[in-house]
Image (cartoon, grey):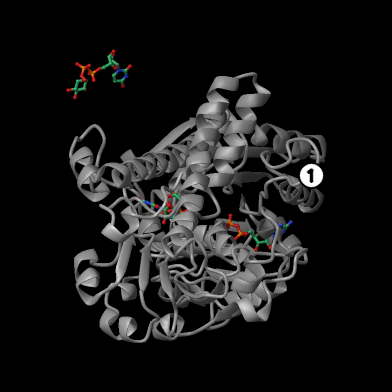
């Protein structure tokens, strides 16, 4: 029986291994982590991450051929194939601070593998890492090999949160990169035969190691670039009276461009896009490719601009001050159908409004009060450490911030309402009821294009919706740069 071990039971490792276990009953899969709390949760009815369909998959396999454990060394020693899916935070100090990936956790995982291995291993990079990480890992392993043969593969994961299970069941492609030697090719075939249990052969792409590593960074950079492109257009739409949804629809009909990923928003978030682009920028700079680095940097700059522009719009619409005013925040997760808040645009928007002394009442169906308060007090990039660093700045004063469990409660007596995540339930709210309980004039700032602008204006709201023709009220307000 083939044994697989995955180091790191996070958003990638957990769901990916659960699906491998489900689709390959003859393979034993162990997911290990240094975090006792995470493993305990994976072994309970309350899984550590919210992902539609995941509970079902875990229930079907857990205890049969899927195991979650903190006994890292035992499972690594027994495995034939080891996936590594540990954190790769952005460095906050030293060389490459604010851009380069910190490979501390990767390196410690590699050294641990070398320490405990007693048989040949295929080591698979699953977390996104800078190009040429495989080479570094290979060196650590071979210089500590004690005669054991290691093959390193890069098998980046392309799942998106909120649709992880569907993405894993029917991936657009599976990418496996390896050495171009007979041993490397044999290792690629071994991993390919795992995926071949459910993924059609033509969707499994094989390449060299560096292509596989770079493809992952490139794919995320291209996706993020589409969002920054449509968000840049949204600013121009507001200035000219065009409607970004109509523009995106017309542009997307060109089959060379395609219709997906053209939704204007308050900005992209998530653990991958910004981090991977920063990484790409750093690699370009290290290779002397300044123009290329600057091109990709601009994708992040537009994303930051979009968040600032949103905050400015809120403040300028409300008579240039939100000081002491209650603002309801609907949605805190970085997208719908996840409880994940890593790099969510809501953090920057909320911090911007808090900086202008607004009182925020935040509601998200999947994010806890504890998490929101932690996010609003953490330094940038600190979220990506296995043991979160202590907040360095205190969370906003209790008076300025409350977290509630109901959208109507968040909106009650508020001057304005900001929609920051596109949860389906925000489309179905009783906006008349919300309007009746708000201060007047009542403002809605829709950062995700979820509300029916015309209907809300009929009710009496002053509505701002990203990239849509402006409310006459907003046209009279100072321009937002
Ligand atoms: C373009 C648009 O495609 C068309 O829709 C619009 O109406 C007019 O402008 P055109 O300039 O005729 O059409 O040719 P196109 O096929 O778009 O190529 C433009 C340039 O891009 C060419 O120099 C082409 O060689 C180059 N190109 C195109 C690339 O370098 N790589 C590609 O993948 C595609
Ligand atoms: C992304 C990639 O899609 C996935 O392939 C990769 O493996 C990991 O990174 P994820 O971050 O989970 O996945 O979610 P994604 O759906 O890509 O959304 C990222 C951000 O972009 C979210 O904040 C989302 O709201 C935003 N977004 C997405 C838009 O603002 N507009 C869009 O049209 C699409
Ligand atoms: P991703 O989104 O890439 O899956 P996560 O942060 O959700 O990232 O998951 C990474 C997991 O890796 C965390 O649960 C962390 O505790 C775990 N981890 C980090 N370093 C090690 C290590 N050396 N051994 C085992 N687990 C580790």
Q: Position of residue 129 (x, y in %)?
A: 62, 41
Tell me the quarter of the picture where residue 183 sits.
Answer: top right
The reply to whether residue 456 is in sight is: yes
Q: Nearer the viewer, residue 150 or 241?
A: 241
CB of mark 1 near ligand 3 (< 8 Å) = no
Which residue lies under the disc numbered 1?
Answer: 93
Is residue 404 positioned above or below 66 on the image? below
Q: Quadrant of residue 169?
A: bottom left
Q: Using the image as rendered, state which of residue 4 and residue 239 is in the foreground.
A: 239
Ligand 1 visible in quadrant: top left
Image coordinates of residue 91 in percent, x first then y, are 73, 45
Judge whether 140 appears above or below 371 on screen.
above
Q: Residue at x 33, y 82 (%)?
A: 434
Dot 1 alpha-carbon crowd within 10 angstroms: few under 14, some 14 to 19, many 20 or more: few
Residue 401 spot, x, y in % from top left: 60, 77
Q: Position of residue 36 (x, y in %)?
A: 71, 73
Residue at left offset 36%, top offset 86%? 437
Count of picture labels:
1
At horizontal 55% and vertical 35% (from top left) the residue drawn is: 213
**On the picture, is 368 further left or further right than 60?**
right
Element type at mark 1: loop
Q: In which quadrant will I find the N terminus? A: bottom right
């Amino acid at each position: 029986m083939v044994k697989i071990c995955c180091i790191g039971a996070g958003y990638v490792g957990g769901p990916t291994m659960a699906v491998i276990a489900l689709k390959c009953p003859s393979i034993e899969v162990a997911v290990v982590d240094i975090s006792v709390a995470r493993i305990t949760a994976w072994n309970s009815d309350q899984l550590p991450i919210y992902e539609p369909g995941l509970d079902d998959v875990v229930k079907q396999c857990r205890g049969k051929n899927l195991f979650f454990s903190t006994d890292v060394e035992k499972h690594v020693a027994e495995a034939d194939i080891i996936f590594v899916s540990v954190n790769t935070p952005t460095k906050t100090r030293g060389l490459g601070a604010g851009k380069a990936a910190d490979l501390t956790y990767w390196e410690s995982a590699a050294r641990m593998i070398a320490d405990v291995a007693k048989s040949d291993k295929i080591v698979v990079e699953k977390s996104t890492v800078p190009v040429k990480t495989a080479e570094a890992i290979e060196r650590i392993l071979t210089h500590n090999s004690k005669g054991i043969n290691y093959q390193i593969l890069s098998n980046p994961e392309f799942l998106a949160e909120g649709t992880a299970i569907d993405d894993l069941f029917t991936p657009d492609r599976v990418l496996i990169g390896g050495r171009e030697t007979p041993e490397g090719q044999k290792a690629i075939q071994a991993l390919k035969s795992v995926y071949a249990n459910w993924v059609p052969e033509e969707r499994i792409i094989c390449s060299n190691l560096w292509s596989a590593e770079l493809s992952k960074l490139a794919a995320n950079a291209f996706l993020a670039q589409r969002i920054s492109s449509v968000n840049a257009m949204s600013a121009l739409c507001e200035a000219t009276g065009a409607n970004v949804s109509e523009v995106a629809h017309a542009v997307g009909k060109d089959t060379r461009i395609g219709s997906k990923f053209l939704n204007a928003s308050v900005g992209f978030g998530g653990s991958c896009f910004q981090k991977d682009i920063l990484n790409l920028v750093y690699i370009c700079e290290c290779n002397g490719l300044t123009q290329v680095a600057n091109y990709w940097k601009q994708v992040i700059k537009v994303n930051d601009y979009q968040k600032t522009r949103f905050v400015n719009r809120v403040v300028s619409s409300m008579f240039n001050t939100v000081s002491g005013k209650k603002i309801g925040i609907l949605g805190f997760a970085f997208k719908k159908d996840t409880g994940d808040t890593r790099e969510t645009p809501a953090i920057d928007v909320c911090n911007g409004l808090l900086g202008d002394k607004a009182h925020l009442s935040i509601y998200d169906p999947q994010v806890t009060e504890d998490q929101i308060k932690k996010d609003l007090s953490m330094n940038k990039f600190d979220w990506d450490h296995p043991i979160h660093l202590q907040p360095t700045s205190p969370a906003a004063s209790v008076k300025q911030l409350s977290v509630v469990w109901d959208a109507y409660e968040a909106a009650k007596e508020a001057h304005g309402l900001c929609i920051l995540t596109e949860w389906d339930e925000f489309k179905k709210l009783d906006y008349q009821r919300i309007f009746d309980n708000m201060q007047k004039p009542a403002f809605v700032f829709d950062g995700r294009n979820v509300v029916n602008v015309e209907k809300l204006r009929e009710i009496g709201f002053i509505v701002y919706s990203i990239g849509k023709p402006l409310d006459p009220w907003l046209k009279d307000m100072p321009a937002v740069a």
